[in-house]
Image (cartoon, rainbow, N blue to C red):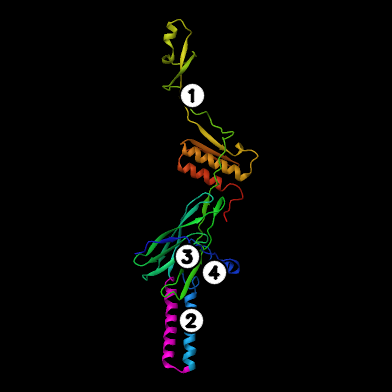
Amino acid sequence: MATAPEVTGRATSAPRGRFGRWLERRIPPARSVTLDQRRIFIFPSLPGLFFFLLLLLILLTAINYQNNMAYAVAFLLATLFVIAILHTYANLAGLTLHAVAASAAFPGQQSEFTLRLERGRRAAHYGLRLAWPRGGDARVSLVDRDSVELRLFVPVGQRGWYHPGRLLLESSYPLGLLRCWTWVDLDLRALVYPQPLASPELPGASSDSPEGAAVAVSGSDDFYGFREYRRGDSLRQVHWKGLAKGQALQSKHYAAYTDRSAWLDWDAFPGLPLEQRLSHLCHWALLFERGDEDYGLRLPGTQIAPARGEAQLERVLTALALFGAGGQGT
C-alpha cells in the first residue's frame, strides 16, 4: 500500500540562474515525467560528508600504523557507502510523476495542485518528499500500491495563470548518507481570479426589464387590467359585465412577470483602472450568484449571456481572470 501523505509547511528554494537554465534543457516541462539517470541527481548529505571524513581518518590511521583491523574497518565502511549510493538511487529510479489538476483561487489564497506518483516496477519506494517552492511539502512511501495521488497547496500570485515552478522530489533512504533528488516541471497552471472589491452600487446595471416587471403576454392567466376593445380580440377577453353596466366595450388584458437579468458591464465603471474595474465586476458576479439571480458579462470583445449557477460563475470569473494582456501569474 501507499502510506498516507504527511503534509508539512517547510518551504523549498527553486533552482535559479545557470543551473535553472540547464535544467530547462535537461528536464523540459511535461505533464508526465519518468525518472531515470538523466533526471536524478545524487550527492552526499551532511551526515554523509562526516561519514566520509571519518572513513578517510580511519584509512590514514591504518596506513600510518599498518593496522590490519583498521584497514578492514575502512574497507567495510567504504563498501557500505558504495552500496548506499546504489540503493539511494534505486529508491527514486523508475518513478513516474503525472500532473492531474490545479484548482482556481483568488489572490492571497492557496491553490490545490493535484498530482499522481506511480512506480514502474514492483520495487518499493520509501521516504519520498515532494515540495513546490513557497508551498508546503508532502512525504509518502510506495510499498504495496502502484500509485498514490497527492495534493499540495501553494499560495498563488496575481490575476491570470499561476505557474508554481519546478517540483522537488527527494529522498535520503536508506541510511541518510546521501541525498537523491530531482527537479521536474509538470506544466501545471492554476487560474487566479481577480481580487473581489466591493462598490456601493452597480452603476449602469442594465436589464431587459426590472425585477417583477409585467409584460403583456397573450393567453396568460395573470390578469393585468382593461384596455379598449380592438377588432380581432377574442370574445373570451371582452369585459361583458362592464358592457352590461353601460360602460364602453373593453377587453381584458393579461401579463406575465419577468425576473431581472443583470448585465455586468465593463462600461459601468468609467475612468477606473483596469484591475479595479475587474475587481468590482468580480464582486458583483459573486453577489448575484449568492442571490441566485441571472447575470451576464460584457467586456470589450467578450459577451456572456445571462444565466445563473456554478457553470455561469466559472465562465464569468474565467473571462475576468484572463482579460487583457496582463494576467500571467508569477
For the residue labelled by badge 1, is the local secondary structure a helix, a strand or a loop?
A: strand
* Secondary element type, mark 2: helix
Residue 44 visible, this orientation: no
Indicate which disc, 2 or 3, sits on the residue closer to the N terminus: 3
Tell me the distance, in whole angstroms, between the alpha carbons under discs 3 and 4.
12 Å
Q: Which residues are magenta?
A: 65-93
Asked if the residues shown at circle 2 and circle 1 are in contact, with their CB atoms under 8 angstroms apart, the answer is no
Secondary structure found at label 3: strand
- Chain-order first, disc 2 or disc 1: 2
User: Disc 1 marks which residue?
Assistant: 214
Mark 4 or mark 1: name the one nearer the start of the chain. Answer: 4
Residue 52 numbered mark, or none: 2
Q: Is residue 255 left or right of residue 123?
A: right
Report the amino acid beneath label 2: Phe
Q: Amino acid at mark 1?
A: Ala
Q: CA distance from mark 4 to mark 2?
A: 30 Å
Q: Residue 33 — which label? A: 3
C-alpha separation, residue under disc 4 versus residue under disc 1 = 68 Å
| Residue 213, image x, y percentages | 50, 25
Q: Residue at x 47, y 65 (%)?
A: 33
For this rendering, which residue is in front, 125 or 68? Answer: 68
Q: Look at mark 4 in the image and give the residue it sits on.
A: 26
Q: Residue pushed farthest right?
A: 271
Does residue 83 show up?
A: yes
Label 2 vs label 3, nearer the camera: 2
User: Which mark is first along the chain, 3 or 1?
Assistant: 3
Q: Residues within 10 Å of mark 2 (few under 14, many from 20)?
A: some
Above or below, 217 against 276 in this view is above
